[in-house]
Amino acid sequence: MIHLTDINENNVAEAEKLEVAEEQKSFLDSASGIIRRAKIYKNLNPHLFGIAEDEKIIGLALVKDFEDEPFGYDLQQFMTDKNFQNMGYGTKALALILDFLRAEGRFDQVEICVKKEDIPAIKLYEKAGFRDSGYVDENLPDCINMIYYL
């Protein structure tokens, strides 16, 4: 059964071994990079989620607060190991993350920046209810800014 778990000293080595498919590597940081980002963003209330199937870590997600207005959650990274993709785990894990953020209740929106070429990710987020916000970051013109209202 899919659930969210903390990444800690007991499972960090397992989490760092996660990998995405070769064609996805230009879209996401490595697993160890995602874990490092959580430490770098320590002043932005980071949530580092382990995605687990029973006791096995199969993915990671990192959510932090936006530094500037409009305030909300920033889904920085979301990955499922290449051996567990296309099985519905990402869809279920994303729903759990959104439920967690809704329950936490500090903000009413979640945003993510997705490369325009990453069609599978865009479809996943659209399926979950994310929509193109219409905002274009001049520093990331090759990305679609997607938003989900909690």
Image: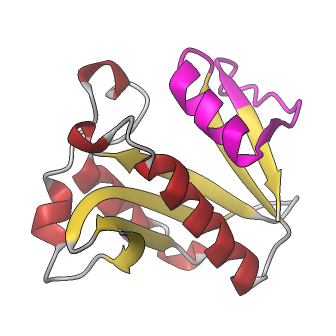
- The residue at 64%/17% (across/down) is 142
* Depth order, front residue of 82/28: 82
The answer to which quarter of the image holds residue 51 is: bottom left
| Residue 149 appears left or right of 53 | right
Residue 138, horizontal then vertical, whole percent: 75, 25
The quarter of the picture where the N terminus appears is: bottom left
Magenta stretch, residue numbers: 116-144
- The residue at 71%/27% (across/down) is 144
* Depth order, front residue of 16/100: 100
The answer to which quarter of the image holds residue 94 is: bottom right
- Whether residue 36 is situated above or below residue 26 in the rendered picture: below
Residue 40 visible (yes or no) = yes
- Whether residue 30 is situated above or below residue 37 in the rendered picture: above
The answer to which quarter of the image holds residue 121 is: top right
- The residue at 66%/45% (across/down) is 112
Residue 55, horizontal then vertical, whole percent: 21, 74
| Residue 31 appears left or right of 70 | left
Residue 44, horizontal then vertical, whole percent: 60, 73
Residue 67 visible (yes or no) = no
